[in-house]
Image (tube, coloured by chain):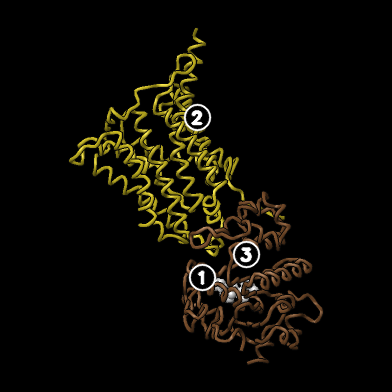
Chain colours: A brown, B yellow
């Protein structure tokens, strides 16, 4: 039993099936939970359904004609199956989309400014507007007047996390934060995510292909494959599983080279 | 002596071009604003201007309605109608086209063009309608060499400059302005921050048609009355102006419109007698063709940032 006694999970998917365009089955029979204060890892190769799950939790999947056609999604005990994005944002869900979606022709400051509103109202806190962001990403302070499109990949990743942080979420969904970043930078950013999770009491679901780094900061992990959960468990146990080592951490090789992984092997062993 | 006359004539053409250009600018900025925020190319912008230009006539004479309103109030109502129509269009039509292919939205704006032509035919027909005396400025602005700037053009210049300055400040310094630009640059990324795309579109349409209504009324004033044909011409010139300015740039639309106005007026003044009547009106289009070839993003358009 994870989470505090009697408290419903922040997010729970119960046997969820997710379909795009009414016909394309992307996720099938997935059940997972994220409890207050946890970091949950969603792992798996390209096309496994990681992003799809996040998109249906935040509701943004509906803009891509995604729909939960079976099972349910709940948030803090309430049924939110196929809820729209705006009410989910109002409930405290902030989604960092895959691919470092900074507003390119806005400056870094203007990007941060866009995080200042929630539910049509200006967020107020004791700290000054961006202080929270600078606490975790001091580099951004020097870039305030730079067009976000001209900052480096690492800076853009920091910016989208900072922008989401200013938005004061209860639940933060992070999609591929490690994408295309140098290993050292990935380590730093993941370490900062962990600090944010602990200090600001923000529950996180992190979808990433970098299993090693993600499991290092996560409490619990799910491994997806072809839209289904193949493996799940406490992060520290998952790291030690042979299959994970073999297929997702690479035998000492480059751990993000999924294209070379032969996925069917995993399915064969766990079905 | 004749040199002075020539300079004076040239100045007159130029000043009139500036004035006309400012009228175009009010409509072009409305066009650019909608494109910038919502991605919709509203081909009906000039036709909306025609509708707004007609409204004071309709309201202040017993042409169509059975009551008359003071002409000045009629103008005020027209501007308010611009705001209102912006809201109505968004709630009634464009809201349902969020995320639909660009082509279907363009078809909708073309349908609006046809509808407006129909409405105008029904209301007054294509003929000329004199404007109520009371709203026509009876003053001019004297300039050098005995050249005078017409009242409506003077008003257009003031309104256009003020509008562009206000919009630029709005987009640069306010949170709402940043949010509108953010939503324009990446709808999904804005939505997951709680931005309501519907609301940004409402704001854009309301501001756009308010500005355009001012342009539509001032144009009618500059010719002391309203007739339909010139507005359809404006509808096309405005498109040229906006493309010249870079489509999604507010100051670009302004400068593009001024340029088009001046080119048109100088062309009409100097080339019409030599080449053929009406050549001045075609000239901006020829100019546009060259611009599209030389500057595909216009003068100030957003080039996609290409990172290495
Ligand atoms: N908008 C969409 N419309 C239709 N199908 C989609 C859409 N988005 C994703 N899919 C499909 O759904 C499946 C799951 O994709 P998803 O993006 O969730 O995978 P992922 O695990 O996030 O992969 P990656 O690691 O490459 O980001 C894939 O087969 C994909 O092609
Ligand atoms: Mg993905």
The reply to whether discs 2 and 1 touch (Cβ–Cβ < 8 Å) is no
Where is residue A254? Give x, y as percent.
Answer: 78, 75
Residue in the image at 63% along x and 72% along y:
A201
Q: Callout 1: helix, strand or loop?
A: loop
Q: CA distance from mark 1 to mark 3?
A: 15 Å
Q: Which mark is residue B263?
A: 2
The chain that hosts pointer 3 is: A
The reply to whether discs 1 and 3 touch (Cβ–Cβ < 8 Å) is no
Q: On screen, A249 above or below B277? A: below
Residue B102 or residue B149, whichever sits in front: B149
Task: Classify the position of the C terminus of chain A by image quarter.
Answer: bottom right
Q: Callout 2: helix, strand or loop?
A: helix
The chain that hosts pointer 1 is: A
Q: Residue furthest front?
A: A126
Where is residue B293? Give x, y as percent.
Answer: 58, 41
Q: On screen, A130 above or below B243? A: below
User: Can residue A259 be seen in this snapshot?
Assistant: no
Q: Which residue is mark 1?
A: A91
Where is residue A255? Give x, y as percent.
Answer: 76, 76
């Amino acid at each position: 039993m994870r989470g505090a006694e009697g408290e419903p999970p922040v997010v729970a998917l119960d046997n969820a099936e997710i379909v795009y365009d009414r016909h394309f089955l992307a996720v099938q029979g997935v059940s997972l939970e994220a409890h207050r204060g946890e970091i949950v890892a969603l792992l798996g190769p390209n096309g496994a359904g990681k992003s799809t799950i996040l998109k249906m939790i935040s509701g943004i999947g509906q803009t891509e004609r995604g729909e939960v056609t079976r099972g349910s999604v709940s948030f803090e005990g309430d049924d939110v199956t196929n809820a729209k994005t705006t009410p989910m944002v109002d409930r405290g869900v902030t989604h960092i989309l895959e691919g470092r979606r900074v507003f390119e022709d806005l400056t870094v400051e203007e990007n941060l400014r866009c995080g200042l509103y929630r539910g049509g109202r200006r967020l107020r806190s004791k700290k000054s507007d961006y202080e929270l962001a600078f606490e975790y990403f001091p580099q951004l302070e020097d870039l305030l007047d730079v067009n976000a499109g001209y900052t480096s990949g690492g800076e853009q990743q920091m910016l989208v996390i900072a922008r989401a942080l200013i938005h004061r979420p209860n639940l933060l969904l992070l999609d591929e934060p490690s994408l295309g970043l140098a290993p050292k930078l990935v380590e730093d950013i993941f370490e900062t995510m962990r600090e944010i999770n602990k200090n600001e009491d923000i529950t996180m679901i992190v979808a990433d292909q970098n299993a090693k780094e993600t499991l290092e900061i996560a409490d619990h992990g799910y491994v997806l494959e072809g839209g289904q959960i193949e493996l799940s468990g406490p992060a520290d146990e998952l790291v030690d599983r042979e299959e994970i080592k073999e297929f997702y951490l690479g035998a000492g090789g480059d751990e993000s080279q999924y294209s070379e992984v032969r996925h069917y092997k995993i399915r064969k062993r766990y079905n | 002596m004749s040199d002075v006359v020539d300079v004076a004539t040239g100045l007159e053409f130029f000043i009139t071009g500036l004035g006309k250009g400012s009228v175009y600018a009010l409509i072009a900025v409305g066009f650019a604003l909608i494109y910038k925020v919502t991605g919709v190319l509203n081909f009906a912008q000039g036709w909306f201007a025609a509708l707004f230009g007609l409204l004071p006539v309709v309201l202040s004479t017993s042409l169509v309605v059975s009551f008359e309103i003071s002409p000045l109030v009629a103008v005020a109502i027209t501007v308010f109608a611009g705001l209102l129509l912006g809201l109505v269009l968004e709630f009634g039509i464009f809201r349902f086209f969020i995320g639909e292919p660009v082509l279907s939205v363009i078809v909708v704006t073309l349908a609006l063009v046809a509808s407006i032509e129909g409405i105008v035919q029904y209301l007054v027909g294509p003929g000329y309608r004199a404007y109520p005396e009371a709203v026509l400025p009876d003053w001019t602005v004297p300039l050098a060499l005995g050249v005078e700037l017409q009242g409506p053009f003077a008003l257009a210049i003031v309104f256009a400059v003020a509008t562009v300055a206000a919009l630029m400040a709005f987009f640069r310094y306010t949170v709402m302005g940043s949010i509108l630009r953010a939503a324009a640059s990446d709808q999904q990324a804005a939505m997951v921050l709680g931005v309501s795309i519907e609301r940004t579109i409402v704001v854009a349409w309301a501001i756009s048609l308010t500005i355009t209504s001012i342009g539509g009324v001032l144009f009618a004033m500059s010719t002391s009355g309203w007739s339909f044909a010139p507005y359809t011409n404006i509808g096309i010139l405005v498109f040229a102006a906006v493309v010249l300015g870079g489509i999604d740039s507010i100051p670009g639309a302004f400068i593009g419109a001024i340029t088009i106005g001046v080119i048109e007026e100088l062309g009409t003044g100097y080339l019409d007698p030599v080449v053929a009547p009406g050549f001045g009106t075609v000239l901006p289009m020829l100019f546009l063709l060259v611009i599209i070839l030389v500057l595909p993003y216009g003068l100030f358009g957003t080039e996609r940032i290409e990172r290495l």
